Image: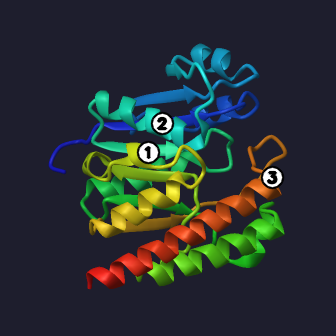
Amino acid sequence: MDSKPKVVVVLPAYNAEKTLKKTVADIPKDIVDKIILVDDLSNDKTLEIAKSLGIQVAKHRKNRGYGGNQKTCYRLALKEGADIVVMIHPDYQYDPKLIKHFVSLIGEGYFDIMLGSRIRSRKETLAGGMPVYKYYANRILTFLENLATGHNLSEWHTGMRAYTREVLENINFAKNSNDFIFDSQVLFKAIEKGYRIGEISVPVRYYPDSSSINFSRSLNYGLRTLGLAVRYFITSKTKS
């Protein structure tokens, strides 16, 4: 990008009242042009706190799910004229101060997508609070997704990502699931279209106030993700 890109940060929020202020406070305002929070019908004070922070706020009239929330986030960001859209969970698991590195690597033309990987070593990841079953599920699914696509990403399941405008306009994310599998669907579509994906390590920090899905939903997510990988692999072999 020849000139300074317009950077919009989107926050898909659901019951984030305890961590929202900290997340927004750490977003580098000299890099980011606009912050948009989409509230997915929280039953706490997320919406009120967001409005008090002076950021752009949108509210769903009914709960649309994690993927449905992101769809609204990206539509609003593109409407605002974003060149780079950074998605970060407002649960403070991810360090917003690292946004500047995501923007730099995309803005200088190295990558079309940036991921914040929590997986650097097993010891560090578990010490940061990631539940053991989630760590191993993450590693297994990431391995299988890499195997299916021929990539070598260290983590497919991060909640801190950045995309160019072109990526979001060309992957037809509106047809993705409204559930948690949305993120994996985005990456499979991006890889299919040949977009370049980069990643940097981010600290692992699970807090009691951070959001998390339970074991049964995690299992369902894992099985659906596995199905995605298998379908992608079969389809890619058929095309070749």
Residue nearer the viewer, 205 or 180: 180
Name which residue lies at 68% across and 77% down.
Answer: 121
- The three-letter amino acid code for the residue at tag 2 is Val
Residue nearer the viewer, 133 or 189: 189
Q: What SS does tag 1 mark?
A: strand
Q: Which mark is residue 168?
A: none
Q: Earlier in the sequence, mark 2 or mark 1?
A: 2
**Dot 3 corresponds to which residue?**
214
Residue nearer the viewer, 1 or 87: 87
Name which residue lies at 43% across and 79% down.
Answer: 233
Q: Earlier in the sequence, mark 2 or mark 3?
A: 2
**Dot 1 corresponds to which residue?**
86
Classed neighbour count for the residue bearing mark 2: other residues with Cα under 10 Å, few (<14), some (14–19), many (≥20)? many
**Dot 2 corresponds to which residue?**
10
Q: CA distance from mark 3 to mark 1?
A: 26 Å
Name which residue lies at 62% across and 50% down.
Answer: 94
Q: Position of residue 125 (x, y in %)?
A: 73, 69
Which circle, 3 or 1, is nearer the viewer?
3
Name which residue lies at 27% across and 69% down.
Answer: 194
Left/right of residue 147 with respect to residue 21 in the rendered view: left
Q: CA distance from mark 2 to mark 1?
A: 6 Å
- The three-letter amino acid code for the residue at tag 1 is Val
Q: Earlier in the sequence, mark 3 or mark 1?
A: 1
